[in-house]
Amino acid sequence: SSFKRNQFIIADSAVSNYNSTPLSIAATLNMDYFIDDLEGKQSSSRLILQSWASLKESFLPKLLHANGYQLLNYGLCDFKNANVTTTHYFADYEERVLFEETIYGRIKRDIWWKVLNYLPGSFSSYTEEERLVEKNAYLLRDKQNFDSILSSLKTTTANPRFIFGHLMLPHAPFYYDRSGNQFPDTLQRSYYDKYYFTEQLQYTNGLISQLINAASPPSNRPRVIIIAGDHGFRIPGSGQSRKSNFENLAGFYSSRDRLEVHSTISPVNYFRVVLNNYFGTKLPQLSDSTILLQ
């Protein structure tokens, strides 16, 4: 309802192309799929780093920068001409690539997370201090990114801007209830618990409504706003359908001309539509395919 009140177009059957954040965002900003066939492949640290490198060199930010756009990056990873303003979400994967080639690293990656499911809550691969440091950094990154995105939407400049933002919400871990209160640290909850996911989802809906309301008021420059997810609700193993991995939010606002958005649009086509509409390109629409990683 918030989208519709503010003249957003909703793609009601939208899907993501990958069930992995860095691959999905890289596909969005490269407007294309990865060359390698990744269906059924493991989402390894090496693959994450490769997709991170692809994201840094992605086509769209470089194209816009070359055409005089200011790039503002409130995301998780650097672009070629715009570093993130907070911290790198995938910074530890460089170390993991080496660590996971050791015997202990393989055990911890492939077995230990399964063992933890059968151990009391006091067992963990992290110390309490490490866990709290990681949690606080995680929450601070999201807050700073959200505040920066919201502030940017409320301001206009003489020069064109490309503003990219990313929130790790309603993605696990689940820290917030629907009112934005943090769950007690002592609470033991599954990383894939649908109840806590739903609570955090409702909190996220409130943040999205703020972005929607800031996006649509008239401005002295034409603007396009895309508010979209990068993958669906993901549970390892056979506990869910393939479909849930890719069910995706995708809302589009254009202050000038109506964007020709089809109902099943996926990330590889978002900016093909925008460039065709605003820049007069004639980019073909790609097939909206889904590639499932394990």
Image: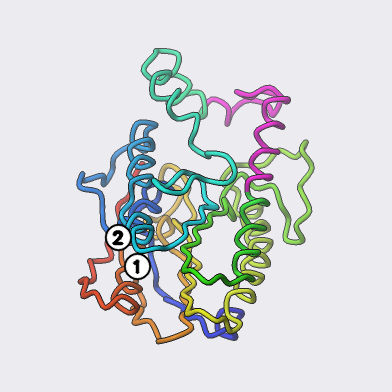
x then y, percent, for residue 205: 64, 66
Q: Earlier in the sequence, mark 2 or mark 1?
A: 2
x then y, percent, for residue 159: 49, 68
Relative placement, left or right, of 25 versus 6 is: left
At mark 2, the secondary structure is: loop
Quadrant of the rendered image containing residue 93: top left
Relative placement, left or right, of 40 versus 239 is: left
Relative vertical location of residue 151 with respect to residue 277 in this rendering, above or below: above
Relative vertical location of residue 165 with respect to residue 89 in this rendering, above or below: below
Q: Which mark is residue 31?
A: 2
Local crowd at mark 1 within 10 Å, few (<14), some, or many (≥20)? some
Residue 146 lies in the magenta stretch? no
Do the residues under discs 2 and 1 have CB atoms within 8 angstroms? yes
What's the residue at 42%, 47% (across, down)?
79
- Could you say which is closer to the camera, residue 246 or residue 93? 93
x then y, percent, for residue 189: 67, 42
**Disc 2/disc 1 C-alpha distance (Å):** 7 Å
Relative placement, left or right, of 284 versus 51 is: left
Please give the residue where the numbered disc 1 appears in the rendered image: 271
The N terminus lies in quadrant: bottom right
Please count the marks in the image: 2
Q: Which residues are magenta?
A: 115-141
Amino acid type of the residue that numbered disc 1 sits on in the rendered structure: Phe
What's the residue at 78%, 53% (across, down)?
181
